[in-house]
Amino acid sequence: MRSTGFRRTLAVIGVSCLALTACGSNDDSASGKTRITVNCMPPKSAKVDRRFFEQDIASFERQNPDVDVVAHDAFPCQDPKTFDAKLAGGQMEDVFYTYFTDARHVVDIHQAADLTPYLKDLKSYATIQRQLRDIYTVDGKVYGIPRTGYSMGLIYNRALFTKAGLDPDRPPATWPELRAAAKKIAALGDGTVGYADYSAQNQGGWHFTAELYSQGGDVVSADGKKATVDTPEGHGVLRNLHDMRWSDESMGSKQLLVINDVQQLMGSGKLGMYLSAPDNIPILVKEKGGDYKDLALAPMPGGQGTLIGGDGYMINKKASPAQIRAGLKWLDHMFLRPGKGFLGDYARARKTDAPVGLPEPRLFTGAADAEDQRVKKANANVPVENYQAFLDGNQSLTMKIEPPHAQQIYSVLDGAVSAVLTEKDADIDRLLKDASGKIDGILARS
């Protein structure tokens, strides 16, 4: 799952391609230009991002007068309800957005162009983190280019830590430490919740997965054929949530929460901790009433692993060689220039009061990463010291992508998470046995 949605802090509503017009385009060589359609353009309602996107396309076309870029707006950038239908119906753009979890699926249904022969023209490709590149690599062939990546961590309220007698510079590093901290925070009373978690709309399954990874567990076997949730690590996740909810009473009485509920609690100063990626922080400030100085980020408790996700672009299998080359040039210009482009122009972002200095996304390695971080630091307008624990702690964690068929699996795991948070006598053995069987069925049908 994507952690929060589009980009930075904007909540937007948009439209996708017109129903009667094909989103893909023909290579318009007769005019002397190569025409490409691209998606994930910010809608008009996201005025600042829309302006930046249009500016960057205009600068690209000035530098590449032989390329005509036609952008389509949409929010969300990829709608799971229409994604496969657009691909199958020939309605997908030439250069189209995907979540990491959909990359293999698009390849399996033969809708993505093989970009391998063209990578020599993409100078920035080798600077991207290998673990992100590998997501779009299938059987040795490259089918997509990463745009952003995120990893899960623990957002916590420094003010509540101090008020509860906890050291805000030493966030919990283990689940027992988190449990103890949550209990102290909840003891402050006045509706204060120590720790909150999602448990509906597939989001409970998503966080179950993150918590399982943090303890060294897995949702499916390495070969992708069997569920691996009915394990000591899986039991540990549910037992911890159950005991925090019912024995410690540190998770509050209201359950079946989703991301907006938890963000509202944190932004109002009534929540001590929850799991999230760094991109939640601006939303907590801009939309939920939070304060940057109070919000800090730590690595996932447990010390074993963290869930990573993100997005990128693939190119339509119907694209001509000229369109593939033009599409890769466009991606390079828009997203793969350290300290520049739509997501990396930190000086431009700062001028619009967008947050600069969050620890992610961190796309590059080596000299490219150093340059990107230099420009980010020079333009930082948030308390970067609040995120240092996250940066330091992530160095020792295993970065793990979401499981195959993630949304179907999350739907199954939602039931287990919601049960332990709403039923004091929930049977954890039965819940995990049932979930394991259902996940096995999902994997067998793939």
Image (cartoon, rainbow, N blue to C red):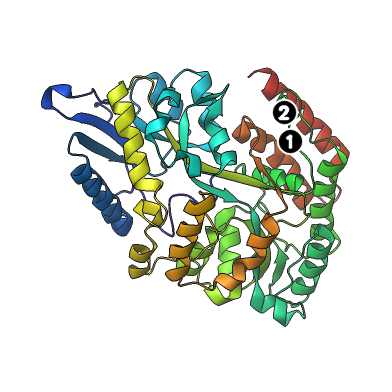
Q: Position of residue 147 (x, y in %)?
A: 45, 44
Q: Amino acid at mark 2?
A: Ile
- 37 w.r.t. 321: above or below: below
Is any part of residue 282 visible from this angle? Answer: yes
Q: Nearer the viewer, mark 1 or mark 2?
A: 1
**In 3D space, how far apart are the residues under numbered discs 1 and 2 (Cα atoms)?**
9 Å
| Residue on which disc 1 sits | 219
Q: Please report whichever mark, 1 or 2, sits nearer to the chain's N-terminal start.
A: 1
| Labelled disc at residue 439 | 2
Other-residue count near label 2 (Cα within 10 Å), few / some / many at <14 / 14–19 / ≥20: many
Viewer-proximal residue among 221 and 159:
221
Element type at mark 2: helix
Q: Position of residue 363 (x, y in %)?
A: 51, 49
- 237 w.r.t. 85: above or below: below
- 420 w.r.t. 92: above or below: below
Q: Tags 1 and 2 in contact by the CB under 8 Å rule?
A: yes
Q: Residue at x 47, y 64 (%)?
A: 374
Quadrant of image for the C terminus: top right
Q: Is residue 19 left or right of residue 446?
A: left
Q: Residue at x 20, y 35 (%)?
A: 68
